[in-house]
Amino acid sequence: MGTVVAGLEGVVAGVTRISRVEGDVGRLSYCGYDIVELAEQCSFEEVIYLLWYNELPGRKQLREFVAKLMAERPLPTGLVYTMRTLPHTTPPMDALRSCVSLLSVYDPEDPLDTGDESNWRRAFRIMAKLPNIVATFERLRTGHEPVEPNPTLGIAANFLYQMTGQIPNDLSARAMDVGLILHADHEFNASTFSCRVTVSTLSDMYSAITSGVGTLKGPLHGGANQEVIKMLHEIGLLDRCETYIMEKLNRHEKVMGFGHRVYKNGDPRAAILKKMSRMMGEQAGDLLWYQMSHRIEEIVWREKKLHPNVDFYSASVYHNLNIPHDQYTPIFACSRVAGWIAHIMEQFSDNRLIRPVGDWVGYEYRPVVPIDQREAQPQAAA
Ligand SMILES: CC(C)(COP(=O)(O)OP(=O)(O)OC[C@H]1O[C@@H](n2cnc3c(N)ncnc32)[C@H](O)[C@@H]1OP(=O)(O)O)[C@@H](O)C(=O)NCCC(=O)NCCS
């Protein structure tokens, strides 16, 4: 039996050409391009193209790519009907997970056809529909009718438009776009690995994306951004940051949005989002969220030498975009789905069933005693 590696930390589980995390130098790149340059110069659509085809598109390629995505935005009528029946109290991430799963029954492809061509068509459908699902559920649960996609708007601006019915200004659209770019892929993170495990059994893309959404939901992964905004609300005042964080650390609780399995010297995405958070605060005339975040960053560094991760400043950015807090993780999914799809296709292209082993620490072999002869045992632990 090999050595058990808790949390599979540092275990190399496969090869990939999609994104590269260099934790020691604090760099993230997609297909060889530094995330900082991509966030400065590209749109989310260009980044999706890059993740899927390993190259940045030219203008004509991008136009055709965007047109194909736009054509897939509308949701199946049956899905919207089902969404109307969901309780308004359904957490949006649960709604998203269920709707992604349900999308498969409306897919026009032959379910038995798992060839590349039909999978790429599924990829466009899933990518284009996820933001629409999130926005449509937001409208329905707040008692409004869904807003139809606007064909003149890119993914980021259209998402904000479908959520609110208002076309966002350039800075808000750009902040959303940058958020989507920065969350789009991250090597073998937990949800991406779930997707890869699912398709490694030769299961289908919808099942894999459903696994991905379910895995992303946890507070140690995509759920952290919601926990961050909850914390900022609980603190509420700049002067309370010190006491609140010190009390939390003294109770040995984690401060959400800090620390990372791989980036021990800082998460490059956090630095970009920090700037965005400040700009959004200035636009809104409300710098409190940025200032509290900055103060917390100083305290956590002083006490624990931990850096903020991608979730920390994305929380104040999304807050200033007026996005409801429980939609932060679904938005993360709308971005990460680009990476999930790239990884699913990469896994399919050179598949071997992913099936690790466990190290047995339970009972040694023992015979089954007939039920009438068994003595009552204390309730067994699960
Ligand atoms: C991201 C995370 C899961 C990485 O975990 P990991 O690599 O398994 O690291 P560990 O949880 O083992 O933490 C190592 C040490 O740092 C501490 N630590 C890590 N993150 C911390 C945090 N956010 N707040 C306070 N302490 C933290 C741990 O308590 C542990 O201390 P110990 O050795 O004294 O027990 C972890 O940092 C975390 O839970 N962060 C908060 C959730 C979060 O923001 N997730 C989003 C990730 S992008």
Image (cartoon, grey):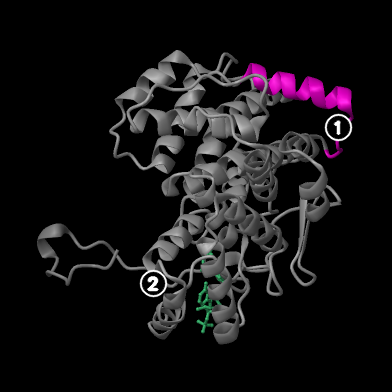
Disc 2 residue type?
Answer: Glu
Residue 133 placed where, x, y %? 49, 29
Residue at mark 1 to residue at mark 2: CA–CA distance: 59 Å
Quadrant of the drawing holding the N terminus: bottom right
Q: Which mark is residue 57?
A: 1
Q: Residue at x 41, y 40 (%)?
A: 92
The residue stretch that appears in magenta: 54-72
Q: Nearer the viewer, residue 366 or 186?
A: 186
Residue 373 placed where, x, y %? 12, 64
Which quadrant of the render holds ligand 1? bottom right
Badge 1 element:
loop
Quarter where residue 252 is shown:
bottom left
Disc 1 residue type?
Answer: Pro
For marks 1 and 2, the one nearer the N-term is: 1
Quick check: 151 above or below 171? above
Give the residue number, with chain letter if any, for mark 2.
Answer: 364
Q: Residue at x 78, y 34 (%)?
A: 49
